[in-house]
Image: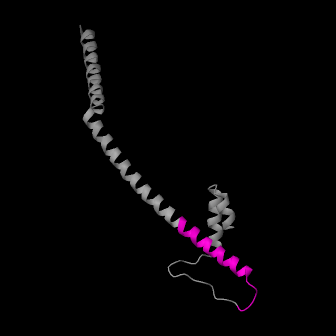
Amino acid sequence: MSIMARTQDQEQKRFEAMQRRLESLERVREPEGGKLRLDDALARLQKLEGRLAKIEETQLVQAASIRSDLALAEANRQARISKPSGPADPPTLIPGVPSITPTSAFNLAYNDYLNGKFDLAVGGF
């Protein structure tokens, strides 16, 4: 009889442990809790996509500005090469357009090369 009582107690404890595990699994699978977490994740993802789009747009504008500066610098260089040597003209500065150093021009051209924009890279070099 005592063996049977102990066995019954052990089975009762196993049953209670299984019941607790089942309840915890049901809490995890609750549709409302899962839906709230999914909605929150989607909202965060949309925010991050918006921020990424703004960053990409800014980079495109900056790259276009830099390419414009490089084209202007190249045109000025070509003009200086084709002119007969005479008194040195001061460099032409355009208000609002930053000047670009040779190192910056090289780095930009190298980045174009790394990104597979070979024609643009050749022009930059």
In the depicted structure, whether residue 14 falls above or below residue 123 = above
Of residue 95 and residue 62, the one placed in the foreground of this image is 95
Would you say the magenta stretch is mainly helix, strand or loop?
A: helix
Q: What stretch is highlighted in magenta?
A: 63-87
Image quadrant occupied by the N terminus: top left
Q: Residue at x 25, y 35 (%)?
A: 32
Residue 25 lies, in percent from the top left, at: 30, 29
Residue 116 lies, in percent from the top left, at: 64, 55
Check if residue 113 falls in the magenta segment.
no
Instruction: Indicate left or right for 27 with 108 as reference.
Output: left
Of residue 110 and residue 30, the one placed in the foreground of this image is 110
In the depicted structure, whether residue 83 falls above or below residue 112 = below
Instruction: Indicate left or right for 5 with 119 as reference.
Output: left
Check if residue 67 falls in the magenta segment.
yes
**Tally of numbered tags:** 0
Instruction: Indicate left or right for 122 with 9 as reference.
Output: right
Q: Which residue is drawn at 29% across and 20% down?
A: 14
Instruction: Indicate left or right for 8 with 84 as reference.
Output: left
Of residue 33 and residue 117, the one placed in the foreground of this image is 117
Coloring basis for residues? one colour
In the depicted structure, whether residue 4 falls above or below residue 70 = above
Residue 6 lies, in percent from the top left, at: 26, 14
Q: Looking at the rendering, which quadrant does residue 117 occupy?
A: bottom right
Image quadrant occupied by the C terminus: bottom right
Q: Residue lying farthest right?
A: 85
Q: Residue at x 58, y 78 (%)?
A: 99
